[in-house]
Amino acid sequence: MRKLVIGDIHAGLKALEELLEQLSPAAGDSFVFLGDYVDGWSQAAETVEYLIGFGAHHKSLFLRGNHDDLCLGWLRDGVENPVWLHSGGEASQQSYRGVGAETRKRHIRFLEGLLDYHLDTENRLFLHAGFTNLRGVQHEYFSKNYYWDRTLWETALSLDPRLTPADTAYPSRLKHYREIYIGHTPVTRIGKERPHQAANVWNVDTGAAFKGPLSAMDAGSKAVWQSKPVHLYYPDETGRNGGG
């Protein structure tokens, strides 16, 4: 049985379909989607609809990304955050033009039902971005940190690799979990093209919103599957390369 972690999709449905074809899902597989399903390429509404259908047939957990929360604010409440519009929101709005009221309601329910985090029986934590409370994720006071925080990843990257959890200087946040899986901050920013580990944190966002591939990782074996760079599926689009 595989526990398959899927990085940030950013409306790149064509890449997701190819990636899942590579994975050839089996009956015992489970999936953890790390969030940011929308905002970037042109298939936001189509991606959400696909994920709803996928979750009906496969054991899946869908986590909340910051872009999902922003898109929900627009779909449900009409909030048009200027930063969101510049960072992929306009593409999502375009995708939802012509989508009927019932479909929009179904997508709102999906986005409202996304999980902040998942902690499994093997003490592996999955969430979109991070948390700040030194006592652990369940003590986080600001819930938006689950899908906005970058300090967890920055802390893991800056950690002296000679330190171990037994050292007093080892960050308390990292000691609580055997492994932590995140997205949110593309590893392409540090020159990587595959999911990257820093301390006990695995970052599976390989820059699908920009010029990187979409990635999946087996949390058990650490095997990795990748699509082509997502921009190759959308040659007439800029994705988030054109705006934030």
Image (tube, grey):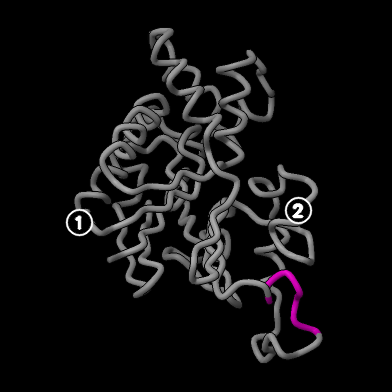
| Residue 218: percent from left, percent from top | 35, 66
Residues drawn in magenta: 169-175
Which residue type carries mark 1? Ala
Q: Magenta stretch containing residue 173, yes or no?
A: yes
The answer to which image quadrant residue 86 occupies is: top right
Q: Is residue 73 left or right of residue 221?
A: right
| Residue 130: percent from left, percent from top | 66, 56
Mark 1 closeness class: few <14, some 14–19, many ≥20 residues within 10 Å: few
Which residue type carries mark 2? Glu
The image quadrant where one finds the N terminus is bottom left
Mark 2 closeness class: few <14, some 14–19, many ≥20 residues within 10 Å: some
Q: Magenta stretch containing residue 219, yes or no?
A: no
| Residue 159: percent from left, percent from top | 70, 79
Residue furthest out toward the front = 121
The residue sitting at 71% across, 42% down in the picture is 144
Residue wearing tag 2: 140
Q: From the viewer's perspective, is residue 51 above or below residue 99?
A: below
**How far separated are the C-alphas under marks 1 and 2?**
35 Å
| Residue 210: percent from left, percent from top | 47, 45
The residue sitting at 57% across, 36% down in the picture is 67
Q: Is residue 6 left or right of residue 200?
A: left
The answer to which image quadrant residue 190 occupies is: bottom right
Q: Secondary structure at mark 1?
A: loop
The residue sitting at 18% across, 55% down in the picture is 24
Residue wearing tag 1: 26
The answer to which image quadrant residue 231 occupies is: top left
Answer with mark 1 or mark 2, whichever residue precedes in sequence: 1
Q: How many marks?
A: 2
Q: Nearer the viewer, residue 118 or 80?
A: 118
Q: Are marks 1 and 2 in contact (CB under 8 Å)?
A: no
Q: Is residue 155 left or right of residue 13?
A: right
Q: Secondary structure at mark 2?
A: loop
